[in-house]
Image: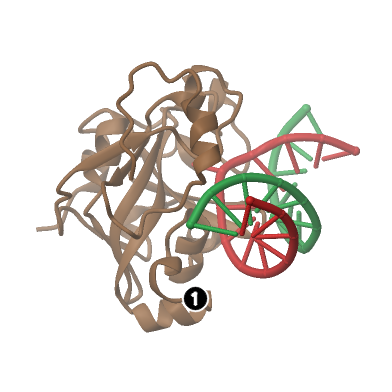
Chain colours: A brown, B green, C red
Amino acid sequence: METDWQQWAQSAPTPVLAQALLGTELVVAGCGGLIVETEAYLGAQDRAAHAYQNHQTRRNRALWGPPGTVYVYQMRQYCLLNLNVQAQGVPECILIRALEPTRGVAQMAARRKQTGVAIANGPGKLCQALALTLADNEKPLAASRLNLTLNVARPAAIASGPRVGVLNKGVWTTAGLRFWVAGNPYVSGISRRAAELHQKGWQHGTDEHA
DNA sequence: GAGCTGATTGGCT
DNA sequence: GCCAATCAGCTCC
């Protein structure tokens, strides 16, 4: 049975949905794999989000679209893939950061000119492997090239920690809104030093060391 | 192996 | 002109 993504995207708080995406299979034109890492972005209140203070621009307007809308944007020479969640007009989203390749692996490796874990262990790499571009932006999931299947695999354990590339954003810098499948080798790398910087001021000590 | 740095594109102020 | 939710390669332990 197909998932009603518009409904799903409003069925729980964004961090919960971000965790639910772990173990979900993402397939685009025969290439894809299991989602092993996501980050939650909490809209207008979140200093690290594009939608902070409801600042709407041409680039990020997909965030205000219906739940289940695909939000792709460009960072340097790469594209990053997000899924818009929560009610229309609430600009929260989930960044999909890493995949464990399972389908069309050879083709993805060819696009990336890399093999193994390096095929999709990062948001820019993932989009390159799947050949996602700005042409995929602002489309309802159901009408997009993306094919998602929930719960294809179930993580043995989910780890959480600070998001990547979020510096000097107060409490949002250390908020544990990044989720990954604990121990999975396809999760994107984060340098030890960067991790320590993030951990400064971390009070809850819930960090797992993957 | 870990950390640092340059590359390079597009959007916003 | 500045900044950005990155990546890969190079240096130095």
Please give the name of the residue rendered at 33% of the width and 45% of the height, measured from the top-left corner: A210
The picture quadrant where one finds residue A159 is: top left
Whether residue A61 is visible here, answered yes or no, is no
Residue to which mark 1 is pinned:
A114
x%, y% of residue A88? 38, 32
Residue A182 image point, x, y percent: 26, 47
Chain of the residue that carries numbered disc 1 in the rendered image: A
Q: Could you tell me which secondary element the residue under label 1 belongs to?
A: loop
Q: Quadrant of the N terminus of chain A?
A: bottom left
Amino acid marked by disc 1: Gln
A166, A14: nearer the viewer: A166
* Residue A74, placed above or below residue A60: below
Residue A27 visible (yes or no)? yes
Q: Residue at x 33, y 54 (%)?
A: A141
Which is more toward the observer, A123 or A26?
A123
Query: How many labels were placed on the picture?
Result: 1
x, y percentage for residue B10?
70, 53
- Neighbor class of circle 1 (other Cα within 10 Å; few <14, some 14-19, many 20+) is some
Q: Nearer the viewer, residue A121 or A26?
A: A121
The percent position of residue A116, horizontal first and vertical second, equals 39, 73
On the rendered structure, is A85 left or right of A168? left
